[in-house]
Image: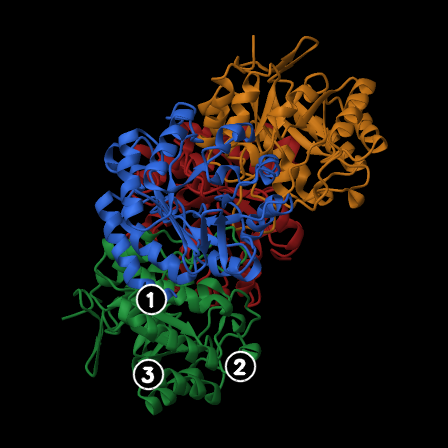
Chain colours: A orange, B red, C green, D blue
Amino acid sequence: MNAKTRDVIIQFPDLTVRREDRLLIAGPCSVESRDQVFAVAEVVKEAGFHFLRGGAFKPRTSPYSFQGLQEEGLRILKEAADAFELKIVTEIVDANHLPLFQDTVDVLQIGTRNMSNFQMLKQLAGSGKPVLLKRGFAAKVEEFLLAAEYLTSGGNEQVVLCERGIRTFETATRATLDLSAVPIVKKLSPLPIIVDPSHSTGRSDIVRPMALAALVAGADGLMIEVHPNPQKALSDGYQSLTIDSFREFVVEMKRLWPFLT
Amino acid sequence: MNAKTRDVIIQFPDLTVRREDRLLIAGPCSVESRDQVFAVAEVVKEAGFHFLRGGAFKPRTSPYSFQGLQEEGLRILKEAADAFELKIVTEIVDANHLPLFQDTVDVLQIGTRNMSNFQMLKQLAGSGKPVLLKRGFAAKVEEFLLAAEYLTSGGNEQVVLCERGIRTFETATRATLDLSAVPIVKKLSPLPIIVDPSHSTGRSDIVRPMALAALVAGADGLMIEVHPNPQKALSDGYQSLTIDSFREFVVEMKRLWPFLT
Amino acid sequence: MNAKTRDVIIQFPDLTVRREDRLLIAGPCSVESRDQVFAVAEVVKEAGFHFLRGGAFKPRTSPYSFQGLQEEGLRILKEAADAFELKIVTEIVDANHLPLFQDTVDVLQIGTRNMSNFQMLKQLAGSGKPVLLKRGFAAKVEEFLLAAEYLTSGGNEQVVLCERGIRTFETATRATLDLSAVPIVKKLSPLPIIVDPSHSTGRSDIVRPMALAALVAGADGLMIEVHPNPQKALSDGYQSLTIDSFREFVVEMKRLWPFLT
Amino acid sequence: MNAKTRDVIIQFPDLTVRREDRLLIAGPCSVESRDQVFAVAEVVKEAGFHFLRGGAFKPRTSPYSFQGLQEEGLRILKEAADAFELKIVTEIVDANHLPLFQDTVDVLQIGTRNMSNFQMLKQLAGSGKPVLLKRGFAAKVEEFLLAAEYLTSGGNEQVVLCERGIRTFETATRATLDLSAVPIVKKLSPLPIIVDPSHSTGRSDIVRPMALAALVAGADGLMIEVHPNPQKALSDGYQSLTIDSFREFVVEMKRLWPFLT
C-alpha cells in the first residue's frame, strides 16, 4: 500500500492518512520562536490535525529579508512535534540539507520556487521521505504533474501535490487560487492533491471560505497558516489566521464534514 | 427594497429572490431550436430553478461563427419561459436592441466582452431591467466593481455580478475560475455575485465540483449551461452538462443545501 | 488601390501613406483645451507627422473619472487640424455617434476596451471611414485578427491594427508591450500594424526606446502621446512625452530612418 | 574594473567586453554531437561573436525528455571553444556540479527555472565565475533584480542579466518577450542586460526582427540559438536559426551597428 493507491494519501509506520481523513496541516509560515511554535502546535493538535508546518529554511525574494532560523528552527519544530505528537512538514531548499532533515522532518516540502528545480527533485526522490510538492506559481497543471514524475519515476511514491495559486494580473489576491486544478488533477493522476488557501490568497480574511470551497471541490487536504500574533509575524502575517480564527474555521469544517464523505 | 439590501438579490412583481434562496439560472449556451429550449426548460423548472438562460444574440470571436438566432431566438425563449413559468436571462450586445428585449426578457445579461463597453452600460442603466454583469475576462475585481457603478450610478440598482473566469497562462481550462473574487466582492460591495462554472472552466467534466465549491465560497447563485445534446451544440458544447448530468448536480446541490443556510 | 495592398497603409483623396512612409500619429491622451491641442498640433506638424490624435469621448474605468470634452473636444480637434493641415484620429465609443464624427474625424479609433464590441465593429464597417483598431489588452493575436475581420468582411478595407500592450503579471509597466505581435501579424495578415508605446508602457521614461524598437521590429507606424504639461494632464500624464522630449525623439527617429528602408 | 562599472559588461584576463561591443552569444540549444557544435562554433567565430552557448545539462519539463549529454557535452564544448578561440556559456543546474564546470566553462548560466533557486545562487556567488542570470518566466523585473542581488551581495559582481520572455495568455509565441524590461533594468541597476530572442519567441521566423529590436531598445547583447539542422534538433529546433539564416542576421545587425553606437 502506498500513496498511489486510491484510498491512502500518506503512510507512516504509526500513522495512515486515508483520502476520507484528508491530510490536514497547519502552522506558522516561519518558525520564529519556541513559544510561537508551541502555541500553534497546541491548537493544531486540539483541532485533530496530524501535521504541523513551519518554515525553518525560507526562500525569500530578497536576500535582505529574514531567511529563517534554519537548524535552530528544525530543533524547535521537533520539540513541539514530540510534545504534541504531531508530524512535521517543512520546506527543504537544498538537497545537501537532507542529512539535517533525515531525523527531524516527516514530510519534505518542495516550495513553489523550486517546483522546477528538477535536480533537487531527482535527489529527493531517493530520500525515502514523503514529499509535499507545491505547484510552481507559473506552472500549468501538466507541468506540475510532470514535475511530480521526477519524484515518482525516481522511486518515491509518497508524493502529495499542493495547489497554492498561480500568478495572474489580479492584484486583489497574492496569487489566484486555481481550484479547478483540483478536480483536473484527480482525473489525470493517482496522486493526492491538497490546497493551501493561505499563500494563494495572501489574505487571512478569505482563507476560511476558500478552504471550505477547496474541500468541496475535492481537495484531499489543506495546509493553513496559523500564527499567535499575525501582526508581528516575520513573514506573511497578513495571510495567517489567528489562533481564535483557526478554531472557528475548524468548527465550520466539522460542520461541512458530513457533506464531504 | 432593492438589490442593494442585504437580503434580496433580485426582485420582480411576482418573484423575489433572497440571498438565502440563491439566484439559480440554467440553460443552453445558444438558443438553437424550439425543441432544444423546451427540453432544457422542462428540467430547469423541475430542478426548482427560476431562471432560464440562452443566447439569442451571440458575440463570437470570429465573424464566420454562428451568430445566434436573434429575434427568432428571443421568441423561442419567451415561449418556453411562458410554458414553464420561468424568467429569461439573455445577453444584450447593443443598447439599440432594447426595444426588442423590453417585452421579452426579464434580466439583461452583459457579456464578458462588453463589461468595459461603458457606453452600453450607461444606456442600460436607464432600462428599468435588472442586469446580470459578467466580469471581463481580463478585469481586476476593482475594475469589475467600477463597471457596475456605471449601472448603479445611472440609477439601476438591480445589478447582479457574475464571476466567469479570468484569462491566464493555464490551458487546461478555458479560463481560470477566480473563486476568491466571491468573498472579496462580498466584502467590498453590497451587490450580489453569482458564478458561472461552465464558461470559466470550459469543461463539463468539472462543472459540478466547481459549482458546489462556488456556493461554499459564498456565491449568491449559479449560472449553468445545460444542453440536450452537447456534442451537437452550435457553440460551447464541451462545457454543457447533459440533462442527466444536470439532474445529478441538482441532487448534489440539494444535499449540500443545509450546510449553506 | 487600398489598405490591403502591400505598399499603402491608408489613403485619402489628398494623402496617401505608404508602408515606407510609416503612419505617424501624435497628440494628447485627452483633448483638454484649445491651447493644449494647438500647442501639440504645432509640434506634430513640425515633426512631419500627418496625424493628430486626441480623445474627445473617453472610456474610463471609473464613472467618476473625467469622461472627455465630447462634441466640444471634436470641435477643438477640427480647428487645430485645419490650422496645421493634419488629419484627425480619435476614438469612437458608440456607433450612434457616427453622424458627429462623419464630418470631423478622418480615422475612427476603436479602443482596447471595445475591440470585442463586435456589434460596434459591424456598424463601423459601413462607415466609409478608415479605422484604427487597437488590440484588446487580453486578446490573442488570432483574436485581434478575427476582430479586424468584422470590419473587413463588412466592406471596410482601410483597417490599421495597433499593438498597445497586453495585460500580464508585470507591474513595472502599465501593460506588457508585445512587440513580437508585429512580425507575427505581418506574416498572417495583409493589414498594416502600428505600435502605441505610450499606453502599453504607461511610462514616458521608456517611450522613446520602445518606439524605436517597434520600428525596427517592423511596425508600420507609431502613435505617441504628447502633452504640453504632462503633470497637469487630466488623464495618463505619466505616459505622455513633453513637447521637448517629443522633439528629441523625432531627431532619434530620423537618425534611425536610413536603417528602416 | 568590473561588471558594475558603466562601460564593461564582462571581463576575463584575455578578453574585455565593453557596453559598446555588446555581449554576443550564439550556439545550439543542446550539445548533441561534436560535428554539430563545431559547425556552429565556426559560424559564431566567423560572425565576430566571442561566446559559444550550448546546453550540456538540460532542465526539462518532463523527466522522459532528453536530459543533455552532461560531462560529454562539456568536453565537446571545450574542444570547440579551444579550436575557435571562443568562450563558453552553459547552464549549471546544481551547485554540486561546480568542480566539473570550473576548468571548462567561462560563464555560468542560471536558467529561467532556477532564477528563484536562491540556495544555488548563494553557492554560485562564491564561484569566481561570471554568471548569466536568466529572468524567471514569471518573475517581475523587481524580483529579477533581487535575485541578482543573491549573487552580487555574495561577492560576485560579474553578473549579466538576460531577458527571455514571460509567461502570458498569448499562445502565438512560446513566451512574451518583454523588451520594456531592458530600458527599465538600465534605469534601476548598474548590471548589463542582454536578450534571448530565441527562447522568448520560440519561433525562428521572428528571431531576427526581435533581436534587432532588442538592440535598439538598449540591450547590452544577445543570445541566439543556431543549429546546423533545426528540424533534427533534440530540443527547441523550431526556435533555432539555421546557419544561413544566422549569417544573414549578422549582416543585418552590422548594418544597424552605426545607429547603436
Residue at left 42%, top 25%?
A: D71
Please tell me whether mark 1 sits on a helix, a strand or a loop. Answer: helix
Tag 2: amino acid: Asn
Tag 3: amino acid: Thr
The answer as to whether the residues below labels 2 and 1 share one chain is no
Q: Earlier in the sequence, mark 3 or mark 2?
A: 3
B85 or A15: nearer the viewer: A15
Q: Is residue C258 visible?
A: yes
The answer as to whether the residues below labels 3 and 2 share one chain is yes
Please tell me whether mark 3 sits on a helix, a strand or a loop. Answer: loop
Q: Is residue C69 visible?
A: no
* Residue most extreme to the bottom: C83
Residue at left 64%, top 49%?
A: B186
C25 to B59, vertically: above or below: below
* Residue that carries the numbered disc 2 in the rendered image: C229
Q: Which circle, 1 or 3, is nearer the viewer?
A: 1
Q: Is residue B24 left or right of residue B237?
A: right
A151 or B211: nearer the viewer: A151
Check residue D258 in the rendering and tell me which mark sits there, or answer none: 1
* Residue that carries the numbered disc 3 in the rendered image: C104
Q: Chain of mark 2?
A: C
Q: Chain of mark 1?
A: D
Please tell me whether mark 2 sits on a helix, a strand or a loop. Answer: loop
Check residue B219 in the rendering and tell me which mark sits there, or answer none: none
Quarter of the figure that contains the N terminus of chain C: bottom left
- Tell me the distance, in whole angstroms, between the alpha carbons under discs 2 and 1: 34 Å
